[in-house]
Structures are given as C-alpha cells and as structure tokens.
Amino acid sequence: MKKYIALSMREYPEDFLYNRDLKRERLSELSANITMLSRQITAVERAIRWKHPCSPEMFQDSKFMTAERKKKTLRQWDTFIKGGFSSHLFTQAIYYHLHQHCRFIAHYNRMGFYSTYWNDDFVAFVKRTGMVVRPVPEAFVNWEEFLFTFDCLGEWVDMSATMLYSLKTHLSSTLRELKDEVVDTFHHDVERLYPLHLEERKRLAAEADEYRKKVVELTTKLDDMDIDSFLEEQSAYYKELFPSLDPADFAEAGMVSNLC
C-alpha cells in the first residue's frame, strides 16, 4: 500500500483516489503546498545569495564553536529537516547556534523558539496516522519570519550558509515528490477514464434532475404567491424569529389594505 505525504491535519483512507471529492481535496492540498514550497525555496535562495555551501570537512574552529561541533550541529539540523521539523529533533545545539550566531532572539528557551516557527501538533498527527513525514508548509508555519531573520554572521558563515543550503535541498526534494504525486494521480485517472466518464455523467444527470425539481418547486411557489400569502409568510417568519414578542404585533388583518 502506498503511503502519502501528510500535507494537513487530514487523514485519507487507502482508496481515496476512487472517491471524487476526497481526490479533489487532495489535489487542492497538493496545489497549495506546491505553491508554498516554491515560495519557500525562492525565499531561501534570496537568503543565501552571494553565499556558498561549505563542505563540513572545510569547517574552521570558531571562538565558541569547534569545527567538530559545527559538523555535529549540521548533522542534527539535517535530521531535523528530514524528520519533518519534529520538536524532539530540534536539539539544544541547533537552538544555541540559531539564537547565538544567526541573529535570532532566544524566545525564552528551546521549545519557545521551536513553537515560534514550527507546528509540533501537525508532526504528532502525522506520526499517529502513519502518513509520510516531510518538511511541508503545515509544519514550517512561520517560515517567512524565520528566513527573514536568519543571517550568516562572521566566523559562523560557513556553517550557517550550509544549513540554508541543506534546507533548500530538502524542500526541493519534497517539492519533486509532490509534483510526482500529481502526475501519478493524473495517470491513475487516465487509466480509469471510461468508468470516470460514466461516473461523471451519472453525477451530472443527478445534479440536473435536482435542478429540474427545484425549478418546478419555485415555479409552483411563484404561481401560487399573491399578496395575502406573502404577508402570511412574512408574519410567520417574524413570529418564529422573535418568539418573545407579542404575536399581535405581527397581526395580518388589515395590513394588506394599508399597503395598497
């Protein structure tokens, strides 16, 4: 059974591709996420403009961070992204580097920082449902502020720039997966073109029949409506809407003659 990437707090049954409404809802989610991921990738590219990734082997010791510690933190950051921004993967080392060396404020503590930019409720939902975890917009909720704030400063520029390149790589990979799902879904529809065509004709026929019934109902109501019946309808509406008022306030007798 194919597992799908979680894009929202919506769990899909195994056969959802055979349900017109569920499939269209999924396609709508795919469209929105593809658009948002593309925006995120563009924002990351702006943030790393004029900067280049650095191989971890080329990292240099800094005043408060050894090259080995940089490598370890970068590996943790990479795992955090691949894990769909799960809070338990947001380590103290990542938190320390971001608020000490990348222009972020501390947000009181590690979880305060995490909850400012990511949504762990969504990540927990994905794990409960068994859907595929990816770094999707539903988890990276405050990405615009994060990328606007993120700065590659001084002696930590090698590691910080590489962190952004890593983020771009994983977002781009997720984007490709979503695009592949769209194409696969289209091919699934093409393979079922004849039954889909029959289903759509049946649906349209039922919808047209409902409209015909509605037209008959409205036409009958129009033919039967005169000024007295309309007044009666209005009075009943007010009495139902305002039961605490005296029904006599909405008495119908003599009103029509006053209106004529």
Image (spheres, helix red, strand yellow):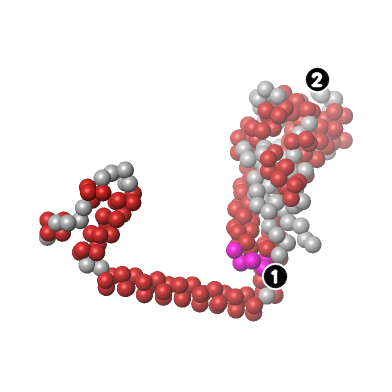
Q: Which residue is mark 2?
A: 63
Please tell me which residue is depicted at 71% across the width and 45% down the height of the picture: 125
Q: Secondary structure at mark 2?
A: loop
Q: Secondary structure at mark 1?
A: helix
Can the viewer see residue 241 in this picture? Answer: yes
Please tell me which residue is depicted at 25% across the width and 68% down the height of the picture: 225
Can the viewer see residue 102 in this picture? Answer: no
Q: Mark 2 belongs to which amino acid? A: Lys
Q: Which numbered disc flags the more N-terminal residue, 1 or 2?
A: 2
Residue 87 % position (x, y): 74, 36
Q: Which residue is mark 1?
A: 188
Q: Nearer the viewer, residue 100 or 156?
A: 100
Horizontal arrangement in the rendering, residue 82 relative to residue 38 (left or right): right
Q: Mark 1 belongs to which amino acid? A: His
**Segment tinted magenta in the rendering:** 17-21
Q: Quadrant of residue 63?
A: top right
Indicate which disc residue 146 carries: none
